[in-house]
């Protein structure tokens, strides 16, 4: 048995899968483990199995039913986490908190709000939904946030490069640019001319088809591929914007 396999077998004992019986392959020292050491062994094994499954690495085969039973919860939890990571995320935003409160969950969703302008509701939304993913939006290019809102009356496409560079400088790996899908080519061209790679930003398009999608050639026929799309401003019949974000958008 490898060291990892032995650890998993010890974990099985800690989980009570085979009572006080000790598998012959487990080192003699295992007989002297205290309850706290058994628990530590189980927790260590759980983390190793979870991380292996989550990262796509092989899990050493178990030699006993007890070993297999011990690792099963970690395998199941990792697969659930993977499924969540690989699924699109629903994001809600509004100029006030109340429409969001009516539909957004307390976990697994995302909320976006403004840090400036006429409706600075980001901090209120963050407090109302502490377990959700949060996206802060600036409507003025002089302000810092996770996203810059480019549309009439707010920031202009030409202001995108300097804003993105400032967000990179403050440690934001992939700042978000929000704009209509029709404006996206102009914005991306401004970024390209400034030497900003497409992969260093996230594009959040507005395209009100009233059908959940993420803009791109295979979804709505648009040539520009977005990372998230705000597809309705009437979610659940309310004055509420809803977006669909690609897996990894909040990674």
Image: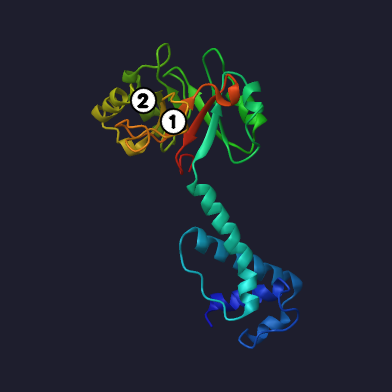
The residue lying toward the viewer, choosing from 128 and 230, is 230
> Which disc number belongs to residue 229?
1
Q: Earlier in the sequence, mark 2 or mark 1?
A: 2
Mark 1 is surrounded, within 10 Å at the Cα level, by few (under 14), some (14 to 19) or many (20 or more) other residues, namely many
Q: Position of residue 220 (x, y in %)?
A: 37, 32
The residue lying toward the viewer, choosing from 139 and 185, is 185
Q: Quadrant of residue 73?
A: bottom right
Q: Position of residue 199 (x, y in %)?
A: 34, 39
Q: Residue at the far left: name it.
A: 193
Q: Position of residue 144 (x, y in %)?
A: 47, 25
Does residue 239 sit above or below 220 in this rendering?
above
Q: Residue at the far bottom: name it.
A: 24
Q: Quadrant of residue 10?
A: bottom right
> Which disc number belongs to residue 83?
none
* Residue at the spot 63% in from the left edge and 84% down from the top edge: 26
Mark 2 is surrounded, within 10 Å at the Cα level, by few (under 14), some (14 to 19) or many (20 or more) other residues, namely many
Q: Which residue is mark 2?
A: 181
Does residue 181 sit above or below 30 in this rendering?
above
Instruction: Check disc 2 and report its element: helix, strand or loop.
Output: loop
Q: Are marks 2 and 1 in contact (CB under 8 Å)?
A: yes
Q: In 3D space, how far apart are the residues under numbered discs 2 and 1 (Cα atoms)?
A: 9 Å
Q: Is residue 251 left or right of residue 41?
A: left
Q: Position of residue 77 (x, y in %)?
A: 60, 58
* Residue at the spot 75% in from the left edge and 72% down from the top edge: 35
* Residue at the spot 75% in from the left edge and 75% down from the top edge: 34
Does residue 201 sit above or below 70 in this rendering?
above
Instruction: Check disc 1 and report its element: helix, strand or loop.
Output: strand
The residue lying toward the viewer, choosing from 238 and 167, is 238
Q: Quadrant of residue 44?
A: bottom right
The residue lying toward the viewer, choosing from 225 and 232, is 232
């Amino acid at each position: 048995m490898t060291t990892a396999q032995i650890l998993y077998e010890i974990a099985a004992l800690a989980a009570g899968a085979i009572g006080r019986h000790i598998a012959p392959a487990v080192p003699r020292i295992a007989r002297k483990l205290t309850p706290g050491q058994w628990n530590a062994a189980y927790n260590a094994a759980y983390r190793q199995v979870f991380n292996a499954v989550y990262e796509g690495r092989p899990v050493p085969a178990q030699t006993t039913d007890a070993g297999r039973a011990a690792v099963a919860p970690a395998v199941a939890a990792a697969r659930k986490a993977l499924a969540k990571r690989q699924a699109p995320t629903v994001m809600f935003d509004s100029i006030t908190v109340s429409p969001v409160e009516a539909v957004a969950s307390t976990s697994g969703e995302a909320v976006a709000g403004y840090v400036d302008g006429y409706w600075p509701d980001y901090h209120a939304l963050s407090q109302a939904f502490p377990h959700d993913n949060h996206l802060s939006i600036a409507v003025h290019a002089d302000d810092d946030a996770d996203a810059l809102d480019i549309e009439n009356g707010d920031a202009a496409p030409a202001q995108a490069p300097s804003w993105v560079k400032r967000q990179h400088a403050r440690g934001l790996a992939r700042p978000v640019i929000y704009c209509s899908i029709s404006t996206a080519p102009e914005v991306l061209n401004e970024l390209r001319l400034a030497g900003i790679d497409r992969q260093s930003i996230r594009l959040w398009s507005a395209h009100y088809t009233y059908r959940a999608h993420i803009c791109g050639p295979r979804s709505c026929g648009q040539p520009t591929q977005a990372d998230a799309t705000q597809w309705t401003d009437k979610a659940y019949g309310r004055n509420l914007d809803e977006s669909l974000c690609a897996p990894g958008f909040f990674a």
